[in-house]
Amino acid sequence: MTTVYQGSCLCAAVTYELSATPKSVSHCHCRQCRKSHGAAFASYGSVPRNALRLLSGANSIKTFASSEAVLREFCTHCGSALFWSRSQGEFADWVSIALGTLDTPFIAEKQKHVHVDSAVHWCSYPPQKPPSRMI
C-alpha cells in the first residue's frame, strides 16, 4: 500500500497531495535556497511531476524563474516556498517539494547536505555537539 502524503502552505490556501514517497532528500545551502526559505538551508524531496496533485489554491501559486532553468513556486498569500523544478534537462519531469510544507509524517531513508561550500557562517555545519556542561 502506497502512502499518500498531504501538504499545505502556512495559510492553507494551497493544499496538495503526493502519490509517491519523496526521493533525493537534500538540505541545500545555496544562496538561492537560503533566500527562498529565509533560513540557513532548505530541505527538499523530489517526486515525479505526475505524483503531485494540487487539491486547492492553484490560482494562489506564483512562479518565479530563479535562474535560466529553475522555477520556484510559492503561495501568493503567505509566501510559503512550496516547490521548485527544472524547466529543461534531465529532471524536467520531476518536482522538488519543500519538506517543511508536508502535513503527513515523513521519514527520509537517505538524506544529504548539498552546496555546503555556500553555508552561512552563523549556523555551524556540520552540526557541532554543544560543549559539555561543567558541574
Image: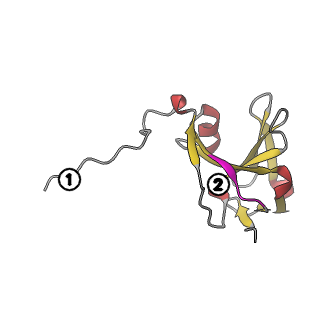
Which of the 4 image quadrants contains residue 50? bottom right
Question: Residue 41: x, y in percent?
Answer: 56, 42
In space, the residues marked 2 and 1 are separated at their CA atoms by 34 Å
The amino acid type, in three-letter code, at marker 1 is Arg
Above or below for 135 versus 86: below
- Rendered residue at 71%/62% (across/down): 7
Asked if labels 1 and 2 touch by Cβ distance under 8 angstroms, the answer is no
SS class, disc 1: loop
- Rendered residue at 83%/50% (across/down): 49
SS class, disc 2: helix
Q: Left or right: 135 with respect to 126?
A: left
Which of the 4 image quadrants contains residue 33? top right
Q: Which residues are magenta?
A: 20-25
Counting labels gives 2
The amino acid type, in three-letter code, at marker 2 is Leu
- Rendered residue at 43%/40% (across/down): 126
